Amino acid sequence: NAGVMQNPRHLVRRRGQEARLRCSPMKGHSHVYWYRQLPEEGLKFMVYLQKENIIDESGMPKERFSAEFPKEGPSILRIQQVVRGDSAAYFCASSTSTDTQYFGPGTRLTVL
Amino acid sequence: EDQVTQSPEALRLQEGESSSLNCSYTVSGLRGLFWYRQDPGKGPEFLFTLYSAGEEKEKERLKATLTKKESFLHITAPKPEDSATYLCAVQPSSGGYQKVTFGTGTKLQVIP
């Protein structure tokens, strides 16, 4: 059973460009969560999605950030007009219900 | 607001020197407490879920325990490969979905 998959693993963008991060949950999992982690800091919740629905986006910045989990295909975290402060590791997790979450390997975003 | 405090921030052990990591939490009713291991540059790896005070779970050299206010991760006779950051997280039980709050972790180094 393949684990949570994220791509790309590393992403470099210049200020003002768009970043698209993809997450495929574990087989059988319909709940997806996105977290951000800065160096030497803990995981910060961003958004929780189920298929075609955003359940909780209380941790997501109001501007430039959006997330979706379409009926078909991976979940996407989109960051428009990136700034240097967006540089971080972004982790996706999935679960079968609202219980134990299993994490992917992360996408490391660097904004030049 | 839910809070998770982990101590110590960093711990250095000699191989074979047993010790414990602490996770203190404040939550309005506990649905679950989670322990994860995170290696540098990787995503958190699930270790344990604990649901009620008095519960204990073991895996190889690790044993997790839970009280009403804190959890301990006991490491018995650690090996260098146990070196990692250990993360604790809590999920409150207040009806339906509740988001998970993570601590900042304990960075464990086991010296041969």
Image (cartoon, rainbow, N blue to C red):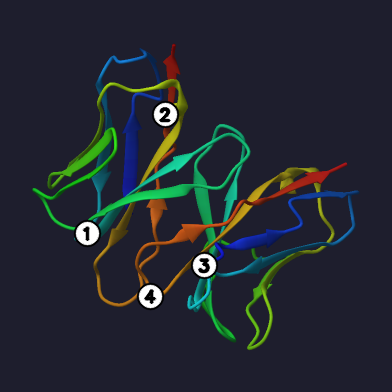
The alpha-carbon separation of the residues under discs 2 and 3 comes to 25 Å
Question: How many other residues sit within 10 Å of disc 1, few (<14), some (14-19) or many (≥20)?
Answer: few
Chain of the residue displaying label 2: B
Dot 4: chain letter? A
Disc 1 element? loop
Which numbered disc flags the more N-terminal residue, 4 or 3?
A: 3
Chain bearing tag 1 is: B
Residue at the spot x=23%, y=41% of the render?
B64
In space, the residues marked 4 and 1 are separated at their CA atoms by 20 Å
Residue carrying label 2: B82
Mark 4 or mark 3, whichever is nearer to me: 3
User: Which label is found at residue B28?
Assistant: 1
The answer to whether residue B13 is left or right of residue B76 is right
Frontmost of labels 2 and 4 is 2
Residue B103: x and y in percent read: 40, 42
Q: Is residue A42 above or below residue A95?
A: above
| Label 2–label 3 contact, CB within 8 A | no
**Residue topped by disc 4:** A97
| Same chain, labels 4 and 3 | yes
User: Does residue B6 appear to the left or right of A107 in the view shown?
Assistant: left
Decide which of B20, A20 is in the foreground and name it: B20
Q: Amino acid at mark 3?
A: Asn
* Residue B46 location (% of width, % of height): 41, 51
How far apart in space, not on screen, are marks 2 and 4 (Cα)?
30 Å
Q: Amino acid under label 2? A: Asp
**Circle 3 sits on which residue?**
A1
Which amino acid does the dot numbered 1 rest on?
Ser
The residue mark sitting in front, 2 or 1, is 2
Please, which chain is the residue tagged with disc 3 on? A
- Please name whichever residue, A94 or B58, is drawn nearer the observer in this view of the structure: B58
Between disc 4 and disc 1, the foreground one is 4
Q: Secondary structure at mark 4?
A: loop
